[in-house]
Image (cartoon, rainbow, N blue to C red):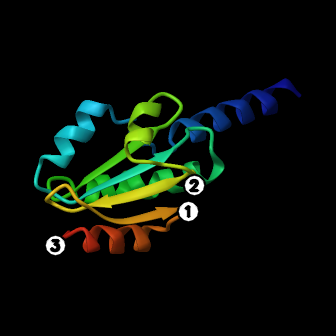
Amino acid sequence: MRLPFTVLAIIVMLTSAARAELPAATATTVNQALSSGKPTLIDFGLRTCPVCKKMAPYLESLSNDYRGRANILFIDVRSDQATAQKFRVQMLPAQIFINHQGKEVQRHTGFMGKEDLIKGLKSAGLK
């Protein structure tokens, strides 16, 4: 009887470890992205937020798909409140799209699917 529970526990641990998740960006990372001349998406959220967790695989995928062409960043507001305040983030999750000149072109609060994230990046100048 113990073996099925052990197997189940291992499966749960492996599947939770496989969940896609961007590393949290720092203020330095944000500044580098904004001065890179590339469109940037900054997603503000919490690692414990269910909606943020649902978006994490999309952000990870976009980060890989557009590496070198766009910056995809995640800010965990629990650990970096200063950056959230700098960008006047009031609700979570919040996505801010910034063009190659470092100017905000679009802002959204709440869940965004992958296609909408791509549209936002295109509005910020992704080619």
Q: Which of marks 3 and 1 is nearer the N terminus?
A: 1
Where 64 falls versus 19 (above or below)? below
Left or right of residue 84, residue 9 in this image:
right
Q: Residue 54: which numbered mark, if any?
A: 2
Residue drawn at 17 percent across, 39 percent down: 32
Left or right of residue 31, residue 77 in this image:
right
Three-letter code for the amino acid on which mark 1 is drawn: Phe
Q: In which quarter of the image is residue 123?
A: bottom left
Where 61 falls versus 126 (above or below)? above
Q: Residue 127: which numbered mark, if any?
A: 3
Q: Quadrant of the C terminus?
A: bottom left
Three-letter code for the amino acid on which mark 2 is drawn: Lys
Q: Judge by depth and name the residue closer to the eye, 70 or 32.
A: 32
Three-letter code for the amino acid on which mark 3 is drawn: Lys
Q: Indicate the position of residue 99 as horizontal and vertical percent values.
A: 21, 62
Label 2: how many Cα within 10 Å (few below 14, some 14–19, many 20+): some
Q: Which of marks 2 and 1 is nearer the N terminus?
A: 2
